[in-house]
Amino acid sequence: MQASKTENRRKAEPFYWLSVAKPRTSSEIVNEARDALQTVKTQRPFTPTDEQRKLFGSQSSRCSQNRRPVCFSLGTSSSDSSESRPNSGVRLSPLTHKPVVIISEKKDDAASVFHPTPPADAAEVRKVSSACKGLFRTPSLKDLFSAKVVPLDQNEVKLDFEEPPMMMNSLDKSNNNCLAEQKLYTSFNDESRQVICNEHTSRSGSEDSMEGTPANFSLQQQGESDQMEEPGKKSSQLRTSGQKRRVTGLKDETRINEWEEEDFFWHTRILPILHELEKKDNIEHLCLTCTKLHQALGDGNMLGKRFKRRNILLKTLYKLVDIDSDPLSLKLAKIILAMKVDGKNLLSVCKLAFKICRNENNYFIIQNDTLLDYLLQVLWNEDLQTNHEALVYCMAAIKVMSEKEALRFKMVSKGAIEMFLELMKQINNIKEHDTYFSKLGHLLVQLTATLRILANCALSRRQLSPSAAIPELCVALEQRSSDKDVCIWIVSVLSKLSTYNDFCAALADCSRCYIVFLALLNKYQKQQDLVVRIIFILGNLTARNDQSREQFFKEKESINTLTSLFQTYYELDLNALTWHHDRKGKNQPKYPSEAEDVLIKLMRVLANLSVHPKVGAALAAAHPVVGLLVTVLEYKSVDACEELVINAATTINNLSYYQVENSAVQEKQLHIAEMLLKLLMSDNMDVVVEAVRVFGNLSQYHEIRDFIMQKKIYKFVIALLDSKNREVCFPACGVLLNLTVDENKRAFLMEEGGIGKLIDCLQDFGPADWQLSCLICKTLWNYSENMASAASCFGGNTNALLMLLTALLDEEVELECSLDKGIKDCQRVYWEREFKPVAEKLLDRIQSHHSSS
């Protein structure tokens, strides 16, 4: 019955006959058949209802319902919002096994290519296919392929569509026949050629549910069935319908041609290369063959998801992954990534890429290859929610690459910095209540670790916009405050960037940064690697201006938090000293120790804060703060930790400047002076200078001046005037100035040769430093307050002093000392406002007593 039915249909449908005098196009044949059907048949062709049309919907619309959202690709725009990409990550763990070979993927790989639905009758499929292909077949195509059967991958994903209930039985029966035929790739011949569909096979209706010829089926296949017509429609509508059918027929023919070309290319170019790979010869030959395969796939436009024999190719490639060769694995990874795999296949290939990158011996082959390009595309294109674990390994591989200068340059040139910031922004858009929030921390660890490496490179810093990077880092730090690893890496990036003015200014503009830093210090008080970096950042911020100092000081519990940290790490340092002392010199601790490093940076923050007048006055009255500073001078020697002692002395010096009620510095001034005396005995000149500076402020108090005279510290201070160093002479002159306030202490200047040394300093530094010159003149003014004559007061230095003062008061001398306009203007202000008034009075006093004598 089936055979006779087929024979009758062939007689009634002339477009199946190939033996015509003049070859015609398939479009002409199909249109002639449709016209014949329209004129011969009296019954209107079957038109599906709205419910039935679901079966014949366009392939693109059906695919879109089953595909995950597509992320926009690198360098192109996309309608998908990047903010809607849910994401997650897994903690990076050592790769202890080979990548798992998984060929079947859990998603629709069919892209947007239309897959025709086979008719109900398998025999009809072969006839239609044979007729259409015969029209466009080249004479030699017939004998190109052997009859060898190539089985399809058994793990193909089948795409099912919604079907009307009344058509289920007939559809299932015909569908089974079609699927059975599609299990084999057969050779092409004139008698029967099967249309080889893609990996996804859609269901079709049966012969009974489709009235009319294959022309009608082709129309319904595209979802272009006409609506039920009302009586009296104009003939123009029929012509329009015929035109639509002709366009559809042309599209079908184009697709058939494309499939034929792909089949031809597969058998002639790709299969021979795959056979070579299956031989598994030496590694060098396999690498060359993989390169040839990659090139051939590109030439045939077979890279990506649209290639219908993709699973066969991937299965062959994954078998080669077991070969322990990084150069070969690199070739395989690039091809697999170019095939746009996802799911577990993507995870496996990203693990493979990370394994290759972390081997130092592979640096040169990676440097001269394009693996970085493929990894950046994965990072940019893949969905964070679907492939979060794969992205962790992808980012880890990129992080390893970023450690090499040449690869860092490639990253920057390819816009990787902007890509990383965009990825961080997408992660920040996922809130804490989201299911994937915690998993994203693992990806963020790798991302921020990469940014830390790039922050150390001047080229990449120029691409890292402060206004874009700093706010996102602060948001991530606040959101991830419970993830210690993420916090450490973000703070590490900020600590590096805060050493540069533009980044530090951007960080200061983040209003909540101080709140976040204080919260982290309280939460992770004993986490030294995190604490020391946050304190370092605060030191950089408070070094900028008074606004930053005041803003931090006003935050709740800011000073109490610093005091608590001070106490914690002071105790840790004491315990460490005791432990090493008990071991009698074995395994000497490094300098500075972790506890000392925190204390050093804490001292710096307090010193910077105390520059602000209101903050400094408040800190000077804070007994816990001053008490801890004194404790540092008590238990820590210069030899043990020089920087810590210097910072503590500097902080005490800043606080001693403020004369406030209930001053803790004033209350402990004698004890502080005792500690400073030990510092003066040090061989370290930096320590000595800091101690003298503190004495310069503390000598405002009568008790300290008596202490200086009693301990003969003034002799040491006078000796410092011979240093010819401005940084040393300035604080020494400050101490001598305060000592000359007391009349009974002025004689020491003449006894120790102090007058001559002061005049020498005035001569050495006068025109170059009007502040120091003013300080010297004030000291001589105090000293000469009750002099009887110039000779008795200044001795043999009187004439030299007169000549020097006269010369320094000459405005032309003042102008000659200036180097440029900025310095000239600044020096002129000091000369006019500070030096000139004091020097003129001193000159008048000396001249009046000198003439009388």
Image: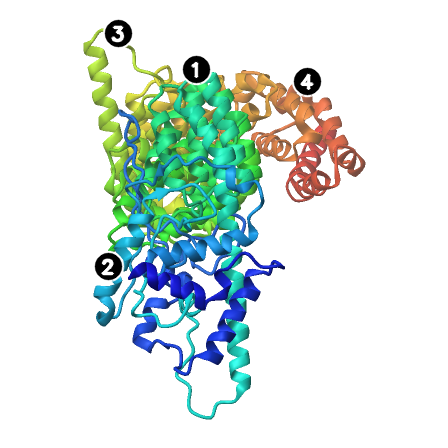
At label 2, which amino acid type do we have?
Lys
Q: Nearer the viewer, mark 1 or mark 3?
A: 1
Residue position for label 4: 796
Q: Is residue 220 above or below residue 277?
A: below
Task: Give the spatial CA distance, label 4 vs label 1.
Answer: 98 Å
Task: Give the spatial CA distance, label 1 vs label 3.
Answer: 58 Å
Residue position for label 1: 282
Q: Is residue 387 above or below residue 583?
A: below
Residue at disc 1, secondary structure: loop
x and y percentages locating residue 252 in the rendered image: 49, 60
21 or 601: nearer the viewer: 21
Residue position for label 2: 173
At label 3, which amino acid type do we have?
Gly
At label 4, which amino acid type do we have?
Gly
How many callouts does the rendering have? 4
Quarter occupied by the N terminus: bottom left
Residue position for label 3: 585
